[in-house]
């Protein structure tokens, strides 16, 4: 177990891969932890030093009173890089992690080599979606997290994938049931309040946007919007619902590596 001490508590992280390789930071989606990236690690660590972490409010990282903001979560990433003496890194984030990636690209581009944002948008949903969820989770606690887990399979995976890979789907959705209700609600508020539509053009890091054809949470239209507003951005789309890194596994890893390794 590895932890970095922040002002308010500990951030849990894991480092894998060659010590002298370029660093790639992986940022989890809302309601998962750093193990959502397990399928990528074998491929990524052939070329990269992979730094995964549990976003504040998730996994084994600190849970502080909410609401959180994407800026706060982005500053956690910078604090993690500072603590590990990493000047610059690649960054790949999915969903909420993709919002964190956008914030970093806009506000801390000097710390980034290349940026990958997956299954995300410049703005995800609206308060009519997020506020009732926050209220339910804070009211019902762990029972609400179990209910969210059971509903998430249909959002996170296509029906054919969930049916053919029940253990893989369960491993990921169990992360949601295990997430702190307070931490989850605080992160829901961060996603609710994030809106980068007017700021995307200030991202200068080389950018790859990845979308899932069947993603109802962050449809491909949101990925196209990001690509169109960031000069030179690349776009890739896979047959997947919201967690394209799990469902498209090898193809996802291959496309990300091709982008990061290109000169």
Image: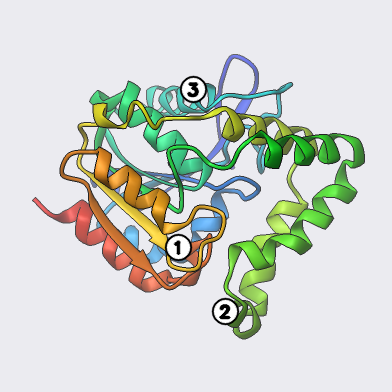
Q: Which quarter of the figure has residue 168?
A: bottom right
Labels 2 & 3 near each other (Cβ < 8 A) = no
State the residue in front, 221 or 185: 221
Q: Residue at x 55, y 60 (%)?
A: 216
Element class at badge 2: helix
Q: Residues within 10 Å of mark 2 (few under 14, many from 20)?
A: some
Q: Is residue 38 visible?
A: yes
x and y, in percent, of residue 161 in the image: 57, 79
Q: What kind of element bears circle 3?
A: helix
Which residue is depicted at the point 74% across and 21% down? 65
| Mark sitting on residue 161 | 2
Q: Are marks 1 and 2 in contact (CB under 8 Å)?
A: no
Q: Which residue is mark 3?
A: 71
Judging by the rendered image, the residue that carries numbered circle 1 is 245
Q: Residue 55 is drawn in which quadrant?
A: top right
Residue 3: x and y, percent?
Answer: 56, 33
Viewer-nearest of labels 1 and 2? Answer: 2
């Amino acid at each position: 177990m590895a932890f970095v001490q922040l002002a308010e508590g500990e951030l849990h992280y894991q480092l894998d891969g060659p010590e002298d390789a370029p660093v790639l930071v992986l940022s989890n989606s809302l309601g998962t932890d750093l193990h959502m990236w397990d399928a990528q690690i074998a491929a990524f660590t052939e070329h990269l030093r992979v730094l995964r972490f549990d976003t504040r409010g998730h996994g084994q990282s600190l849970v502080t009173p909410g609401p959180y903001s994407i800026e706060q979560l982005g500053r956690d990433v910078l604090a993690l890089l500072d603590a590990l003496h990493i000047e610059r890194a690649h960054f790949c984030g999915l969903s909420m992690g993709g919002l964190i990636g956008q914030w970093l690209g806009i506000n801390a581009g000097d710390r980034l080599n290349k940026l990958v944002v997956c299954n995300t948008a410049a703005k995800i949903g609206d308060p009519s979606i997020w506020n009732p969820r926050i209220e339910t989770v804070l009211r019902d606690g762990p029972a609400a997290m179990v209910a969210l887990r059971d509903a998430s399979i249909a959002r996170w995976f296509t029906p054919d994938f969930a049916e053919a890979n029940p253990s893989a789907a369960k491993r990921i959705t169990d992360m949601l049931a295990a997430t702190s209700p307070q931490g989850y609600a605080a992160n829901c508020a961060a996603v609710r309040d994030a809106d980068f539509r007017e700021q995307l053009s200030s991202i200068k890091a080389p950018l790859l946007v990845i979308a899932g054809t069947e993603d109802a949470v962050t449809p491909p239209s949101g990925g196209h919007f990001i690509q169109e507003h960031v000069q030179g951005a690349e776009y890739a789309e896979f047959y997947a619902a919201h967690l394209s890194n799990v469902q498209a596994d090898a193809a996802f890893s291959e496309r990300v590596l091709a982008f990061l390794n290109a000169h």
